[in-house]
Image (cartoon, helix red, strand yellow):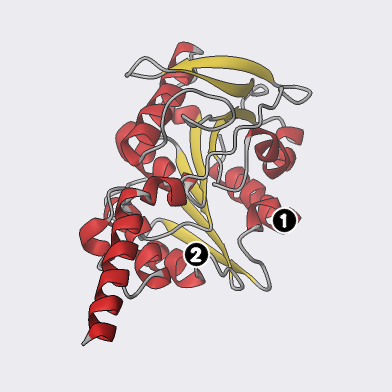
Amino acid sequence: MNILIGASTFYIVLLAIVFFLQSRFLFPAPQEHHDPASGFEAVTLITSDGLELTGHWREAGAGKPTIVWFHGNASSLAGSVYETRLLASKGYGLLLAPYRGYGGNPGEPSEQGFYRDGRSAMEFLEIQSVPNTMTIVAGNSIGSGTAVQMASEFTPAGLFLIAPFTSLTDVASEALPIFPVQLIMRHRFENARKISSLELPILILHGNADDVVPLTHGQNLAARNAEAEFIAFEGAGHDLSFWQEAQQAQLEWLERLKF
C-alpha cells in the first residue's frame, strides 16, 4: 500500500510539473542576440499587445515573392539565414520573423503570443506594399504552427512546411504517453485541423529519420489537403531545413508557382 501511495504521489507531482512548467519545456527561448547578416536589415515589428520585436528583412528582387520564415525552436534569426541561403541567392525576399521571448525580444512565449508575432510580420509586409499574392509563408518545426495559422488568416500565395507536426498535443502525447496530455496542454497548434481548409499551394518536407517530429506527422498533414505536395528525405533528421537538398526542393516548388 505504501508503495502504491508513493507511486501515486510521485505521478501527481510529475503531472503538476508538466502542467505548470510546460511553457518552459515547449519554448526554450534562447536569448542570444544576432545582428543582421549581409543583405539583411534589422526591422521592428509591433505586435497587437504592444511588444516591439526585432526581425531581419531582405527586399525581394524584381518579380520575386517574399517569404515569411518562422524558424524552429533550435534555430534563431542567424540560423534562419543558413536555412534560407539558397532562396536569398535567387533573389527571393525574406522576412526572418522573430518570436517574443527569443533572441532578446520582450514578452513570454505562448501559442497565442506566437500568433500575434506572426500577424505583426504579415502586417509589416503590408506596410512595405508586399501583397498577399506575392507572399509565401514558411515554417520549420514549431514555426509550422504559426505558419499554418497565418496561412489561414491571410491567404498568401503559398505555404511550405519543414518537419511540421499535426499538433503539438500529438507530439507530446507520443513523447509522454503516461500523462493525459490532451487534458493538460495549453499550447496546441492544431495544424491538422487548420490545413484541411486551406485553398493554396502547399509543400511539406520531412526527414524519415526525424526523431523529434516523426515522418508520419508530415504525411498526415499532406493527406488532409489535396493541394499539398509531400517529399520525404532519406536519412534526414530534424535538421532537414539546413539540408541543401531540402532548400533545392523549396526553390523548385517556388519556381513552379510562376510569379
Name the quarter where the N terminus is drawn: bottom left
Is residue 160 found left or right of 14 in the rendered image? right
| Residue holding disc 2 | 213
Where is residue 164 shown, x and y percent of the image? 47, 56
Q: Quadrant of residue 245?
A: bottom right
Q: Residue at x 58, y 15 (%)?
A: 43
| Most foreground residue, 119 or 107 | 107
In the image, taking residue 211 as reference, residue 172 lies left or right, namely left
Return the x and y of residue 95 as percentages of the image width and height. 57, 27
Identified by mark 2, the residue type is: Val
Which sits in the foreground, 202 or 107? 107
Q: Is residue 106 above or below residue 220?
A: above
Residue type for callout 1: Trp
Mark 2 or 1, nearer chain start: 2
Q: Is mark 1 on a helix, strand or loop?
A: loop
Q: Distance between the residues labelled 2 and 1?
A: 17 Å
- Vertically, is 38 above or below 239? above
Q: Quadrant of residue 3?
A: bottom left
- Which mark's residue is nearer the viewer, 2 or 1? 2
Identify the residue at image location x=68%, y=73%: 235
Q: Position of residue 93 (x, y in %)?
A: 62, 27
The quarter of the rendered structure image containing the C terminus is: top right
Tell me, for residue 53, which label it has, or none.
Answer: none
Residue 83 seen in render: yes
Q: Mark 1 points at which residue?
A: 243
Asked if 155 appears above or below 56 in the picture, the reply is: below
Residue in the image at 52% along x and 45% along y: 28
In the picture, measured across the screen, residue 227 lies left or right of residue 244, that is left
